[in-house]
Image: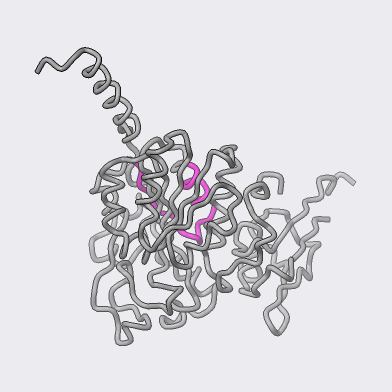
Amino acid sequence: MNSVTVNGLWCKKCGICVEYCPAKVFTAEKDGTPVPAYQEKCTGCGICVLRCPDFALDVGVDVDDGKR
Amino acid sequence: MSSIKYDDYLLKDKLPLFWCGGCGNGNVLGSILRAFANLKFKRQKTVVVTGIGCWGKADDYINTNTFHGTHGRALAFATGIKLANPDLNVIALMGDGDGATIGGNHLIHAARRNVDITAVLVNNFNYGMTGGQYSGTTPEHSFTSTSRYGHIEEGFDLCKLAAAAGAPFVARGTVYGITQLDKLVEQALCKKGFSFVEVITPCPTHFGRLNGLKTASLMLNWIKENSVTKNQAEKMSDGEIRGKFVTGVFVDVDKEDYSTRYKKLQQRAAEAVEGGCDK
């Protein structure tokens, strides 16, 4: 499974990852903090990494995924 | 993501970024750093020159040589740096207030001289750092802190300005079209001569708040809805194209750059001195 991590110190809760993730991996807390709640849906496209204005997201793509 | 390697060029200990939540400057910074990594730019041979303003803070996060100049003069300093050492890769970062309004004259003359500089101008339609006053690119009828009843001036089309001034590479991208922007920045960095990239970027804090676009996603969607490609624009009438952001490469021609011409001039002058000046 791909792993999505949010750097809470760098994130400014702008909501771009929540809005633009094509697989809808993120949910937002009341204050806007993004939570990668549905990591199993992540396709590893990396668009959130490109779209995040604060370098706060990282996607670890599981290269073995699908082989097992 | 193995293709994204900006780590060598990003000063991570300076993060979080200074800019507001939803500001597109971080995306443009990412594009530039990815282009540096893809083109394997040597940190020691690269100089990033900035002026004043929100985007002028970008040099704080870049792990190359950097020069933080005065308001509107980034291109003037960049020209000096390039002429003193033509082997350096010189990149000038300017905002619309910095590069198009206060330093507008430097922009047209750097383009005319064709100094081998890559200029990345981030256009957020207002002076963000000082409280959202209108700038030379603020669109007509839009609201800023100094145009509360709607702006009565028309904004500059900076790409047309740079093209008319003779720049051999002129392009416009948006923060919404981030993959296209990556390519445009890379093309601009590879180009010998003055290369100009305008980037349409969201400013939800000032411009967005007063124009009904106060969240980052509303502003990004506004940019998306108003962006048209160069090919689409060619089929549109003048009325339809008004207020749209035309994206793509507008000029890409080969021209001898200033440093090459200057080197030739030096040789001619040296020959004239050695041969004795008969005339």
Residue B171 part of the magenta segment: yes
Residue drawn 31% across and 82% down?
A: B147
Where residue A28 appears, as percent x and y from the top left, is 71, 77
**The C terminus of chain B is located in which quarter?**
top left
Residue B175 part of the magenta segment: yes
Look at the image and give the residue range highlighted in magenta.
B168-186
Figure quadrant of residue B195: top left
Most distant residue in the top direction:
B275
Where residue B267 appears, as percent x and y from the top left, is 29, 21
Where residue B29 appears, as percent x and y from the top left, is 55, 56
Q: Viewed as shown, does residue A35 lie left or right of B207?
A: right
Q: Viewed as shown, does residue B10 lie left or right of B166?
A: right
Residue drawn 31% across and 35% down?
A: B258
Q: Nearer the viewer, residue B75 or B126?
A: B75
- Is residue B176 depicted above or below B184 in this figure? below
Where residue A19 appears, as percent x and y from the top left, is 62, 70
Q: Nearer the viewer, residue B12 or B137?
A: B12
- Colour treatment of the image: one colour
- Is residue B228 depicted above or below B270 in this figure? below
Figure quadrant of residue A5: bottom right
